[in-house]
Amino acid sequence: MILITFLLMTAALLSGIKSCPVLCTCQNQMVDCSNQRLFSVPPDLLLDIRNLSLAHNRIANIPPGYLSCYTELQILDLHNNSLSELPKRLFINAKKLLHLDLSYNNLSHLPADMFQMAHDLVQVNLSYNPGLRKIHPLAFRGLFQLRHLDLSYGSLSFLGLEALEDLSGLVILRLGGNPWICGCTMEPLLKWLRTNIQTCVADVQRAKCWGPPEVDGVLLFSLTEESFKACHLTLTLDDYLFIAFVGFVVSIASVATNFLLGITANCCHRWSKANEEEEI
């Protein structure tokens, strides 16, 4: 009797370990918890899970270390939730992760080493994060296998070259729908884009400049070296001499003007005082 009870408890325990989370469906190492109005991530997932979908929920936070036990995970879908940030080192053990979808969330920035150790990532979708304004230069460090990066429809006005220049395998890049300020600081990135990203796989018709005024509405990928000619203007010796001469003349004129104003004020004061004495 005791042996039977022990076997039943052991079976129940093993069944619990391998059971599917409530409100989710599980099949062939895939766990689908989408469209369940979840406010938090489900605990105790299958340890050999390869595909996890948490899309179309109301998840606002992910606990630190949540993915640390799921080392076989290859696909993670978190799109259409309420995530404003991700915990540090979330992907530290996600060494087999290939596809990551974080679109339609509330992310505001991407910190350094956000995808640390997830070096096998092939596709990252960060589109439709309307508050995404800042990407750290080291946010994508180490993602040498990355082929598809979607940064469209955020609030990015600037993106440093350092954030992309190590992505040697990048093939598809989406930048449209952002308020890009195409000033001199953007020239290095745009030059790199023209050299490394084929226009046929980039959203060339959607990526537009919002400023400065002279390039407002201009397509991002249409800017050439000529567009940044003003950023490279250099002054000659004659220019410096002319500026020095103008400065000298302006200084003399300023001193003379102050001198004349002083004399005029003094004369007015004396004239006013003389009038007062005559009246007395």
Image (cartoon, helix red, strand yellow):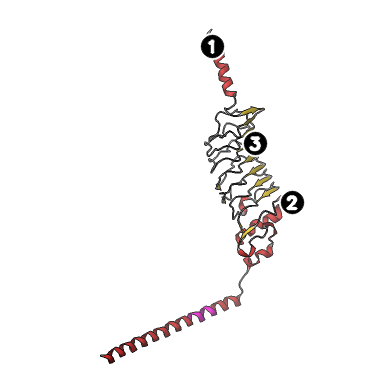
* Circle 1 residue: 5
At label 3, the amino acid type is Ile
Q: Which residues are magenta?
A: 245-251
Q: CA distance from mark 1 to mark 3?
A: 40 Å
Residue pushed farthest left?
280
Please state if 247 lies on the left or on the right of 127 as rendered: left
For the residues bearing labels 1 and 3, Cβ distance under 8 angstroms: no
Residue pushed farthest right?
200
Q: Dot 3, how many residues are within 10 Å of its Cα: few (below 14), some (14-19), or many (20+)?
A: many
Residue 102 percent across, percent down from the top left: 60, 42
At label 1, the amino acid type is Thr
Residue 181 percent across, percent down from the top left: 60, 59
Dot 3 falls on a residue whose secondary structure is strand
Q: Closer to the N terminus: mark 2 or mark 3?
A: 3
For the residues bearing labels 1 and 2, Cβ distance under 8 angstroms: no
Residue 27 percent across, percent down from the top left: 66, 27
Residue drawn at point x = 67 percent, y = 60 percent: 218
Residue drawn at point x = 45 percent, y = 83 percent: 257
Q: Closer to the N terminus: mark 1 or mark 2?
A: 1
Q: Nearer the viewer, residue 202 or 144?
A: 202
- Disc number placed over residue 75 in the picture, else none: 3
Q: CA distance from mark 1 to mark 2?
A: 66 Å
Dot 2 falls on a residue whose secondary structure is helix
For the N terminus, give its image quadrant: top right
* Circle 2 residue: 200
Q: Nearer the viewer, residue 277 or 174?
A: 277
At label 2, the amino acid type is Cys
Residue 254 percent across, percent down from the top left: 46, 80
